[in-house]
């Protein structure tokens, strides 16, 4: 599989993938530099990446999570993977807050990496020291990426409507450029 656009049929360059990631992050209320750093950490911008644990594509979804968030698209499609990743990153803090947690970017990033249930259980069992109970790989993931997400501070997804307009405009401009 190559780095193909969702319906364009043309390969996407890394520059195009990063531009799309930025637009999707903005539309979903995610710090764009953070989302770009996260995808770089997840897959090194390789849409064909497969982790030793079986995570797939740019956003490194596990098969069961992809089945829920991938909208019946291919995890190898950069646009589909980036879109699903942004939607998932927007949803995670909402779910964490519904569980009585703060929903900080540290918790969101750890949830993306370790699993939402694992983070919820760690916070319930260990309180403010929850991250110390996470696997070392998750601790390193959060430590590396949190500075790109407002230093682990409060999450907000209020920018979605404005961002959605920017994504639509960006997609239109990308199609015209072809």
Image (cartoon, grey):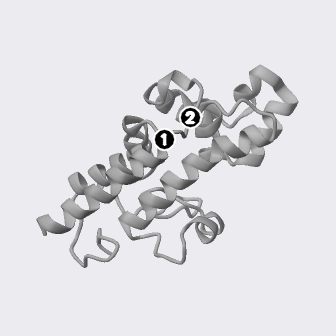
Q: Is residue 2 visible?
A: yes
Q: Are marks 2 and 1 in contact (CB under 8 Å)?
A: yes
Residue 156's label in the rendered image is 2
| Image quadrant occupied by the N terminus | bottom left
Q: Nearer the viewer, residue 161 or 133?
A: 161
- N-terminal of the two: label 2 or label 1? 1
Q: Nearer the viewer, residue 12 or 87?
A: 87
Q: Which residue is drawn at the image coordinates 62% and 49% (left, top)?
A: 91
Q: Nearer the viewer, residue 43 or 86?
A: 86
Residue 150 placement, left or right of 37: right
Q: Which residue is drawn at the image coordinates 37% and 36% (left, top)?
A: 33
**Element marked by disc 2:** loop
Disc 2 from disc 1: Cα separation? 6 Å
Label 1 belongs to which residue?
29
Q: Nearer the viewer, residue 64 or 27?
A: 27
Residue 171 placement, left or right of 27: left
Measured as percent of width and height from the top left, residue 80 is found at: 43, 67
Q: Is residue 45 visible?
A: no
User: Is 25 placed above or below 125 here?
Assistant: below
Measured as percent of width and height from the top left, residue 114 is found at: 66, 45
């Amino acid at each position: 599989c190559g780095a193909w656009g969702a319906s364009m049929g043309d390969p996407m360059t890394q520059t195009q993938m990063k531009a799309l990631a930025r637009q999707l992050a903005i539309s979903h209320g995610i710090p764009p530099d953070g989302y770009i750093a996260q995808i770089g950490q997840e897959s090194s911008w390789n849409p064909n990446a497969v982790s030793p644990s079986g995570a797939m594509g740019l956003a490194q979804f596990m098969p069961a999570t992809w089945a829920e968030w991938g909208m019946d698209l291919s995890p190898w499609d950069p646009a589909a993977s980036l879109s699903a990743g942004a939607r998932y990153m927007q949803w995670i803090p909402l779910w964490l807050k519904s569980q009585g947690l703060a929903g900080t970017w540290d918790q969101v990033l750890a949830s993306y990496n370790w699993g939402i249930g694992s983070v919820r259980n760690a916070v319930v069992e260990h309180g403010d020291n929850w991250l110390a109970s996470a696997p070392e790989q998750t601790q390193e993931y959060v430590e590396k990426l949190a500075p790109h997400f407002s230093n682990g501070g409060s999450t907000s997804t209020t920018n979605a409507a404005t961002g959605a307009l920017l994504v639509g405009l960006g997609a239109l401009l990308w199609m015209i450029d072809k």
